[in-house]
Amino acid sequence: MEINEKYQQFAEKIISPGTVENNTNKFRDIHIRIETIYETMKNSRSSFIYKLIFFYLFSAFAISYILHIFIFKFSFGFAFLFLLILYYFYFNYNIKMSLKKNIKSKSPAKIEPEDPEFLKGRIQYVSEGIKVSLDRAKLLRNFYMLFFPLLTFVLTDIIKGHPLRISGYLISISLSFAIGAGVWYYYFNMDIDEIKEEIEELQQLNADISGFK
């Protein structure tokens, strides 16, 4: 993208030994941090990684539910499979809405790389991408919290070779949600909290740039 090319030119110039400006060190520290956050987002939180994680569990769920239906005929597997399909469309719809809502910045027009406004544009660009990553992480967390306990619930039937009694179902599903949902909530929230901190940090960097003279 053009904004990336302009930013690279700017980064090379302010790091050049022959360049002496009052805010060079401040710009250098800020742009290094921005690019660190950007690289983390691009490499560790890319849309491909989130889709891959979603696909793995979605496939495991679908296979388990279909197997449960095949073994026990009319079963809870029908309801779980229906919920799974609904969440698939819900997940994709919300990702599209997040992209539409957050990805708005374009390559700045008539802005020189030395202008602090260009750096602020870079912050806006990265911030928008991170907000999409945040929405993806929340949707993935909710997906695991809901369907992983249902997966253990169904696998219990398959392993035992017969459906549980009503009391057994109640105990099994209660334990599955209490343990499984709690674990996944904690696991994904570590990443979600980190993303929120990066958004706040970018906002602070943006404020710092505004204070440059």
Image: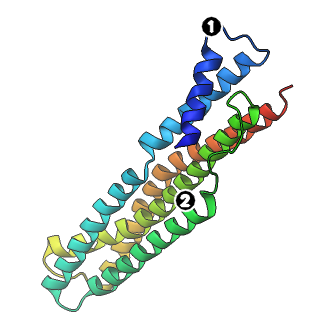
Q: Is residue 173 left or right of residue 191?
A: left
Q: Is residue 113 left or right of residue 210?
A: left
Q: Is residue 191 left or right of residue 24?
A: left
Q: Residue at x 22, y 92 (%)?
A: 74
Q: Vertically, is 100 above or below 213?
A: below
How many numbered dots are placed on residues in this image?
Answer: 2
Which sits earlier in the primary sequence, circle 2 or circle 1? 1
Q: Nearer the viewer, residue 92 or 100?
A: 100
Q: Residue at x 59, y 40 (%)?
A: 3
Which quadrant is home to the C terminus? top right
- Image position, residue 129 (x, y; %): 56, 50
Q: Quadrant of residue 37?
A: top right
CA neighbours of label 1 inside 10 A, class few (<14), some (14 to 19), many (20+): few
- At label 2, which amino acid type do we have? Asp
Q: Vertically, is 184 above or below 146?
A: above
Q: Which residue is mark 2?
A: 135
Q: Is residue 133 left or right of residue 176?
A: right
Q: Secondary structure at mark 2?
A: helix
Q: Which residue is mark 1?
A: 17
Q: Vertically, is 112 above or below 172?
A: above
Q: Residue at x 69, y 34 (%)?
A: 119
Q: Secondary structure at mark 1?
A: loop
Q: Vertically, is 186 above or below 211?
A: below
